Amino acid sequence: MTHKQLTYLGPEGTFTHQAAIEAGNLLTEQYGIDTPELVAAPDVPAIMTSVQSGESWGVIAWENNVEGYVMPNLDALIDAHDAAGLARVGVDISFNAFVTRGASRDIDGLTVSAHSHGLAQCKRFIADHHLKPTPASSNAAACRDLQPGGVALGPRICGDLYGLDLVEERVDDFDGAHTDFLVIAPRDDVMAYSSRAREREFETVITFIPLATGPGGVANLLDVLRDCGLNMTSLISRPIKGHDGTYSFIITLDAAPWEPRFRDMLVEVAEHGDWAKTIAVYPRRERPNPPVDSWMLPEGGIRLDSSKLESDWQSEQRARRELLW
């Protein structure tokens, strides 16, 4: 790692800062790297620039179990000319509400600031207090820059770091919120360091752009994955900006690019003329496989449930309403 630096979204006290601390330990464990120096950056573009210039490695937010993928960061990695992920680290997310030192705890109707994902994870608290959301570049920046007459949402450590008073703890909507962060590095570094741990099982995030659009395009791609014996754990799409009806497809696979079955898949995709780019490869994590219980399901919708004794007429009417037949 050049200069043993790991750049993260600052200022101090962000969830990304916490992830960078964890990432330093993980890199030592997985790749035998000395604990890196942590360097704060003002925004993700600055992190990407630092990585692609070879000055450092970086840490970026990747996927949240409440809001899903962090799309700007995903797009930045797809578009990057020389960056890819080589490690993934998780951080439990919980927000506290702060005001400036000595301010009133009566916060109803005030402006509240946090990163856009943080605001999205605290909607109930914001609505209950009739707060006016204002996005910040990071949750820690919202706390650092908090002015009298406002509220900031951020990690617990921000209260001590920035001399703020606590209004309420754990104001997020969902217990168990969790964000995964990606350690990114120049692509040559990713290849070199991943080769040191090839005895482990890996997972890979790869992007495809089918050049021929139309019915069956995605199905044909998925057929290739199935025929090569690859297990897909995630599939999302992103629009190709400014071109209606064209998309890139981002797929996470339980395999590494150097495995024969993975290479067989890439050969078939390449022969078809489609575009592909691996954007991350890292040691596979243990993932839970819990069932989806009924209470987790959104309002409406239908499912076959033998415990509900509805008449055929009732079932048909409900299906027509929910599926818009």
Image (cartoon, grey):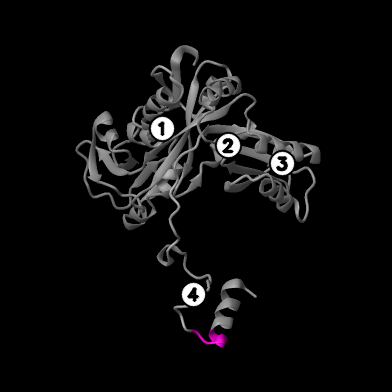
Circle 3/circle 4 CB separation < 8 Å: no
Q: x and y percent of residue 171 in the render? A: 31, 49
Q: Nearer the viewer, residue 261 or 305?
A: 261
Q: Residue 16 shows which numbered tag? A: 1
- How far across and down, in percent of the image, does residue 97 sit? 29, 44
Disc 4 is placed on an element classified as loop
Give the CA separation, mark 3 to mark 4.
39 Å
Q: Considering depth in this image, is 34 or 12 the residue closer to the camera?
A: 34
The magenta stretch is 310-314
Q: Percent from the top left, x then y, of residue 246?
A: 73, 46
| CA distance for labels 4 and 2 | 36 Å
Q: Which of these two is toward me, 132 or 228?
A: 228
Say how many tags the image has: 4
Q: Main secondary structure of the magenta part?
A: helix
Q: Please say whether residue 311 is one of the residues in the magenta stretch.
A: yes
- Res 249 visible: yes
| Badge nearest the viewer, 2 or 3 | 2
* Spatial CA span between label 1 and label 4: 43 Å
Indicate which disc, 3 or 4, sits on the residue closer to the N terminus: 3
Judging by the rendered image, the residue that carries numbered circle 3 is 209
User: Looking at the picture, which amino acid does disc 3 mark?
Assistant: Ile
